[in-house]
Amino acid sequence: MFRVTIRGKFTGLDEAGRAAVLAAGGTAFTEAGTFTHDQSVTAFTFRCEVPAGPDDGEDEAALGAMAVLEAHGHPHEILRLAVTDMREIRIRRKGRTSAR
């Protein structure tokens, strides 16, 4: 699984688009994507989860997330994009002692 964060700004968002962005708000990473935005709904952060195939890398994840963002249909400009490969995340647990 990849988690992709896209930061951008809306270009020419109408009232219907504004209402749709407000309805798709949230901070969770989902396959449909969620928006957080500034008070005037001009700048945004889009969070999206992209399933990972065995040979998929960051480029495929970025393209997949951009396709999900495009599917929302809001005119925008991408300013920054970050991809995290969740397969590489290791959780270190505190307080574990090794068996002797």
Image (cartoon, rainbow, N blue to C red):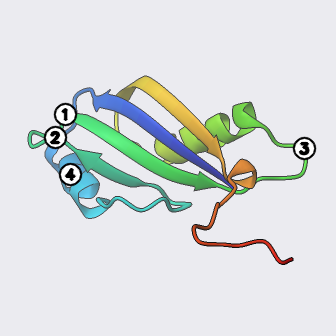
Mark 3, mark 4: which one is toward the viewer?
3
Q: Residue at x 63, y 35 (%)?
A: 62
From the top left corner, tell me how far across and down residue 18 is, in percent. Answer: 19, 48
From the top left corner, tell me how far across and down residue 27 is, in percent. Answer: 35, 58
Q: CA distance from mark 3 to mark 4?
A: 39 Å
Q: Residue at x 26, y 63 (%)?
A: 23
Disc 1 vs disc 3: Cβ atoms closer than 8 Å? no
Disc 4 residue type?
Answer: Ala
Q: CA distance from mark 4 to mark 2?
A: 17 Å
Query: Above or below — where is 8 with respect to 4?
Result: above
SS of the residue under disc 4: helix
Residue located beneath label 3 in the image: 55
Disc 2 residue type?
Answer: Asp
Query: Above or below — where is 94 with respect to 66?
Result: below
Q: CA distance from mark 1 to mark 2?
A: 6 Å
In the picture, the disc for residue 26 is none
Q: Quadrant of residue 60?
A: top right
Mark 4, mark 1: which one is toward the viewer?
1
SS of the residue under disc 2: loop
| Residue 72 seen in the figure | no
Residue located beneath label 4 in the image: 16
Q: CA distance from mark 4 to mark 1?
A: 14 Å
Left/right placement of residue 26 relative to residue 38 reads: right
